[in-house]
Image (spheres, rainbow, N blue to C red):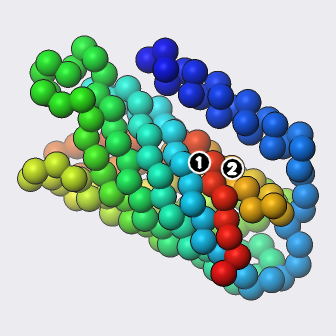
């Protein structure tokens, strides 16, 4: 758990650095299409997991100056806490999230986001989960996008969730 705390502190420091060095407003009604590459770090809300790390690709299409559509896919590795490794026999489990959603910009570059989709387990006999992910974030003019979200996964027989920080860079297509 010490490593996860270091990672979160480092991520918060990076967020603070980017906010301090480049706070520019989103400009105009661009109708742009972007591809974002992101890294996610999360704190699970359920046992037996202690940390989530992952990455994603996100396609974003601007519909107006304050509304964008999203399509995303990626991979998340849910790390099992040490005290549960002997019980489960695994150190991590994987999930491939595929989601669609929207960003609504409420103050220049700051936004609310919402996504719905499916999470496909990479384990043998894995389950498919319904995913929902509300969040907030900030998109910089230099392509950097920082977001904080809750991601819930509902599947037959249970549910799990995480609070995740996403640090991404977007390229205009």
- Assign the N terminus to one quadrant of the image: top left
Is residue 102 shown to the viewer in this render?
no
Is residue 91 shown to the viewer in this render?
yes
Residue at point 58%, 42% (across, down): 165
Above or below residue 117? Residue 1 is: above
Q: Name the spot of residue 169 as percent of width and height, x first.
A: 66, 59
Residue at point 33%, 63% (across, down): 118
Residue at point 70%, 76% (across, down): 172
Q: Name the spot of residue 78 as percent of width and height, x first.
A: 34, 38
Count of marks, rendered view: 2
Q: Nearer the viewer, residue 143 or 132?
A: 143
On the picture, is 71 further left or further right than 23?
left
Contact check, label 1 and label 2, Cβ < 8 Å:
yes
Tell me the crowding category of disc 1: few under 14, some 14 to 19, or many 20 or more residues within 10 angstroms, Cα based: many
- Assign the C terminus to one quadrant of the image: bottom right
Above or below residue 109? Residue 162 is: above
Above or below residue 33? Residue 79 is: above
Quadrant in the picture for residue 49: top left
Tell me the crowding category of disc 2: few under 14, some 14 to 19, or many 20 or more residues within 10 angstroms, Cα based: many
Q: Nearer the viewer, residue 24 or 132?
A: 24
On the picture, is 171 further left or further right than 8?
right
Secondary structure of residue under mark 1 = strand
The residue beneath circle 1 is 166
The residue beneath circle 2 is 146
Q: Name the spot of residue 139 as percent of width and height, x first.
A: 75, 58
Above or below residue 101? Residue 121 is: above
Q: Name the spot of residue 107 as percent of width and height, x first.
A: 85, 59
Q: CA distance from mark 1 to mark 2?
A: 6 Å
Secondary structure of residue under mark 2 = strand
Residue at point 41%, 31% (across, down): 51
Name which of mark 1 and mark 2 comes first in the sequence.
Answer: 2
């Amino acid at each position: 758990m010490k490593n996860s705390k270091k990672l979160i502190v480092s991520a918060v420091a990076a967020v603070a650095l980017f906010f301090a060095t480049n706070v520019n407003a989103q400009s105009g009604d661009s109708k742009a299409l972007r591809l974002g590459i992101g890294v996610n770090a999360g704190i699970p809300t359920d046992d037996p997991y202690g940390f989530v790390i992952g990455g994603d690709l996100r396609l974003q299409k601007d519909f107006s100056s304050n509304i964008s559509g999203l399509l995303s896919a990626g991979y998340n590795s849910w790390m099992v806490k040490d005290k549960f490794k002997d019980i489960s026999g695994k150190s991590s489990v994987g999930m491939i999230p595929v989601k669609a959603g929207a960003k609504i910009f409420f103050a220049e570059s700051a936004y609310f986001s919402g996504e719905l989709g499916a999470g496909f387990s990479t384990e043998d006999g894995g389950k498919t989960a319904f995913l929902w992910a509300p969040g907030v974030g900030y998109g910089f003019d230099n392509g950097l996008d920082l977001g904080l979200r809750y991601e819930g996964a509902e599947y037959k027989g249970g549910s799990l969730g995480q609070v995740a920080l996403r640090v991404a860079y977007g390229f205009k297509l």
